[in-house]
Image (cartoon, rainbow, N blue to C red):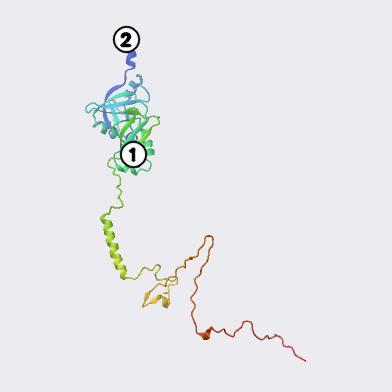
Amino acid sequence: MFGGFGLFQEQFRPFNNLYRCYSVAMSGTERSDIEKGGKIIMPPSALDTLTRLNIVYPMLFRLTNCRHNRFTHCGVLEFVADEGKVFLPYWMMKNLYLEEGSMVQVESASLPVATFSKFQPQAPDFLDIHNQKAVLENALRNFACLTTGDVIAINYNDKVYELCVLETKPGSAVSIIECDMNVEFAAPVGYKEPQRLGNNHITEDDENIGEVSESEDMSTDTQTSFLPFVCKGHRLDGKNKELSPNETTNGKTVARSQRRGIPDYDYKLGIVRFIRTTKPTVKTDQTNDKKSDFEAFKGDGKPLVTRRHN
């Protein structure tokens, strides 16, 4: 009877074991899916032990480096590692201060479902991503849980971005499997907001520009005023354009005088007047002021057929 009670207690004890940890590169196979997430590979004996224990699904584990008192949480991807070994993502080994072949304690854990998390990018280039939340949401699908203080790594466009987990709710370690989690971002490490210059602030470049403009004004006073659309015309047949006498002066092209519109000072709302400029009248001699004797449609009629008179 007591022996049966002891077996009943043994059935509910948690999983706790020590393994030698190695990075994914030491497994002998290229497993990029492990580096992109927060899950580890354990030996088949661990699966055999877990099936005989009362473990809460999904399986979550707490990894502890007892020498440096560092810990994190993770999920499990497969049970295909060699006996006595576990393979971890490289970013997880950095957080735990683990080297190749170091001992790590693996024990089962039960974590609350996440409702909130806050991340801080470790470089300003994370702001170059168009939609940071969508990229992070896609990357967290390969993670099983988050731990406050961890620096996770995500891959996007063949580039690795590191983000520090600043805060998680409702606990310091949460499960992110099938949950609705609000995400916030803190300012990236090394990010500086652009400084806005006031209106009264004058830089050296502005002073140099002012000096150049003053010198240009002095030089333009001696030169002719600016004339728009003054250029040499080109014909389609390749021949040179013959300039009129009004357009040439001592071999230099001169623009014709521009005529501006006459303003209507008697303008009234609702009435539109079309004022046309007319050529100035030229005064002539008094002899030319007299009307000429010419009258229109005055002349002798001539029939086409002449008639004979008897």
Q: Position of residue 158 (x, y in %)?
A: 33, 42
What residue is shown with label 1?
155
Extreme residue in the bottom direction: 310
248 horizontally vs 303: left or right: left
Q: Position of residue 96 (x, y in %)?
A: 26, 31
249 horizontally vs 96: left or right: right
Extreme residue in the right direction: 310
Residues at marks 1 and 2 touching, judged by CB atoms closer than 8 Å: no
Q: Nearer the viewer, residue 158 or 221?
A: 221
Q: Indicate whether 288 appears above or below 203.
A: below
- The residue shown at (37%, 38%) is 133
- The residue shown at (53%, 84%) is 288
Q: Position of residue 64 (x, y in %)?
A: 26, 26
Q: Which mark is residue 3?
A: 2
Q: Nearer the viewer, residue 100 or 196?
A: 196
Quarter containing the C terminus = bottom right
